[in-house]
Image (tube, rainbow, N blue to C red):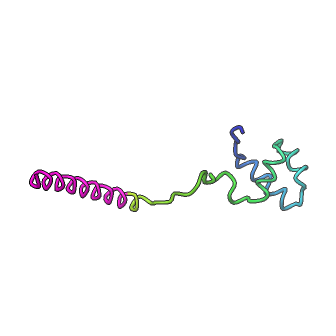
Amino acid sequence: MGLVSTLSTEEQAQLGIMIQLGFSTLQMRRRITRSRCCVKNYVRDTMAHGSAKPTGSPRILNDRDERSVAATAQLQQGFRNLLSQLRNFFYLFSQ
């Protein structure tokens, strides 16, 4: 898919008038020399034209949750190190 250029404000104004006058999409696209799909998308939702649509899936964790998970992982790693040191300590004294 190629990049799509948005309609200029002049073209949007022309389409708005044509919509009010009851022009068909074929007549509109011939007047402003744009594709049928472009005109159809504008007619379907004139307010959202030109705004970016979200891509990809939504995030599972927000920034705060990510920091919380990272902090918990660091604590867990610290506990593992402490446990490992205690095992070594008791192993040395048990012999």
Q: Residue at x 69, y 54 (%)?
A: 49
Q: Residue 61 at x, y = what percent?
A: 46, 60
Residue at the top extreme, as displayed: 2
Foreground pick, 90 / 77: 90
Q: For the view shown, which residue lies furthest in the front direction?
A: 95
Q: Nearer the viewer, residue 64 or 85?
A: 85
Q: Quadrant of residue 82?
A: bottom left
Q: Position of residue 16 (x, y in %)?
A: 79, 57
Q: Quadrant of residue 3?
A: top right
Q: Position of residue 65 (x, y in %)?
A: 40, 62
Q: Say if the magenta span includes residue 84.
A: yes
Q: What secondary structure characterizes most of the magenta part?
A: helix
Determine the residue positioned at 81% across, 43% down: 34
Picture residue at 84% right of the left edge, 62% below the top:
20
Looking at the image, residue 9 lies above or below residue 64: above
Magenta range is 67-95
Left or right: residue 66 compared with residue 24: left
Q: Residue at x 24, y 58 (%)?
A: 79
Answer left or right for 93 relative to 45: left
Horizontal side of 18 relative to 64 (left or right) equals: right
Is residue 78 rendered magenta in the image?
yes
